[in-house]
Image: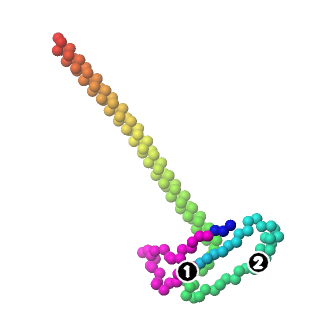
Amino acid sequence: TSVTHGIKLYPPPPTAQQPPPPPDAPVLAESYDEVVFTNPTERFFGRLQQVPQVPTLSLDEKLQPHFPPSYSDADHFLALLEAKKFLDKELNSVKERLDGVDRDLERADVQLKEAQEKAQAAAAAVAGGTTTTRKQAAHKGAA
């Protein structure tokens, strides 16, 4: 399996809290190769475990500030957990707002239906009253 993805070469645009990088700051280009063995045999897994630790390279003093001092899977995992908590909180907030809007919409529908029924009843009463008045006028005219 081979997975390729781009790596951001430039820092994000400056903000009020973070000034732009100095013009002499280097542009970093990194690549990362990883070989993954899915379900290796026990013998092959044992041989893989015998490979010595890959030596780390020391960085030039000028480049050191541009690289994180250390990498920790645990730190990244904790950051992901915090991001998940934040997203869950935001999702719940949006759901609550949508539920409130749904309740308001249901109330408005009930009020609209009641107003329409009242308007129809009033129109029927007016129409019934007009008919009676006409009948009375016609009866009086005949008399």
Q: What is the span of residues highlighted in magenta in the rendered image?
A: 4-29
Direction from residue 37 to residue 117 in the image, left or right: left
Q: Residue 132, relative to residue 59: is it above or below?
A: above
The residue that mark 1 highlights is 28
Magenta span: helix, strand or loop, mainly?
loop
- Under circle 2, the secondary element is loop
- Count residues near mark 1 (Cα–Cα under 10 Å), then give few for <14, some for 14-19, many for 20+: few
How many numbered marks have been drawn onto this rendered protein structure? 2
Q: Give the image location of residue 88, x and y in percent.
A: 54, 58
- Under circle 1, the secondary element is loop
Q: Amino acid at mark 1?
A: Leu
Q: Residue at x 33, y 30 (%)?
A: 120
Q: Residue 102, relative to residue 74: is it above or below?
A: above
Picture quadrant of residue 34? bottom right
Q: Is residue 17 visible?
A: no
Picture disc at residue 51: 2
Q: Is residue 138 visible?
A: yes
Q: Amino acid at mark 2?
A: Val
**Quadrant of the image containing the C terminus:** top left
Q: Give the image location of residue 48, x and y in percent.
A: 77, 74
**Quadrant of the image containing the N terminus:** bottom right
